[in-house]
Amino acid sequence: MIAVIGLGNPGSEYEKTRHNVGFMALDFLREQFGVEEFHEKKSLLGEMSEGSINGSKILLFKPTTFMNLSGNAVQALIGFYKLDPKQCIVIYDDIDLAVGTLRIRPSGSAGTHNGMRSICTTIGNDFPRIRIGIDGRTPEQKLNQDLADYVLGAFNKQERALIEEQISKIPEELKKLVKENV
């Protein structure tokens, strides 16, 4: 079994923000793989969809905690299904990568991402991750704009197209990860 965890913030006001790229990716994966609709799992602090990829069971999971508490939901998921953290693939936005960049790593640090910091604090750093770059700021914006305001802002049309292009690559990458048993 593989759990694919997309990071984001719950609520319609955050739906189209840069910080919700993980949720956007899971919605796309659910459609591409034809798995069931997301349903709430209150005891796991998230929403889940179940199905299979290449004959392997897959759980798509969106924490319903706010980003900074994502580790609580991931820990509940791992505990309930008795998963090894290496069976979890986390998809999230990364301000340290240019908008539209996709990077896949077998493990690593949390970097500057508070949701990842929460997860790494609860389950460690040894799990695969898919990072989607969201940094489209100008040098002046990097100096003067509040980071929280930026990540909680919406994509412009050009950024949205770049993000959608990268998200469209994730199903094939995920199939490879599942085939290689992560």
Image (cartoon, rainbow, N blue to C red):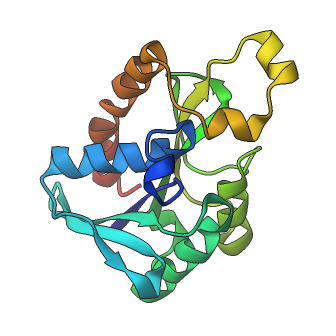
The image shows residue 162 at horizontal and vertical percentages of 43, 19
Position above or below: 113 against 86: above
**Picture residue at 87% right of the left edge, 20% below the top:** 143
Apparent side of residue 128 relative to residue 69 in the rendered image (left or right): left
The image shows residue 138 at horizontal and vertical percentages of 73, 11
Apparent side of residue 175 relative to residue 83 in the rendered image (left or right): left
Residue 3: quadrant of the picture: bottom left
The image shows residue 179 at horizontal and vertical percentages of 28, 51
**Picture residue at 65% right of the left edge, 57% below the top:** 115
Number of numbered discs: 0
Q: Can residue 1 be seen in this view?
A: no
Position above or below: 65 against 145: below
Q: Is residue 157 visible?
A: yes
Q: Nearer the viewer, residue 182 or 150?
A: 150
Q: In which quarter of the image is the N terminus?
A: bottom left
Q: Quadrant of the C terminus?
A: bottom left
Q: Which of 9 and 7 is in front in this view?
A: 9
Residue reaching furthest to the front:
13
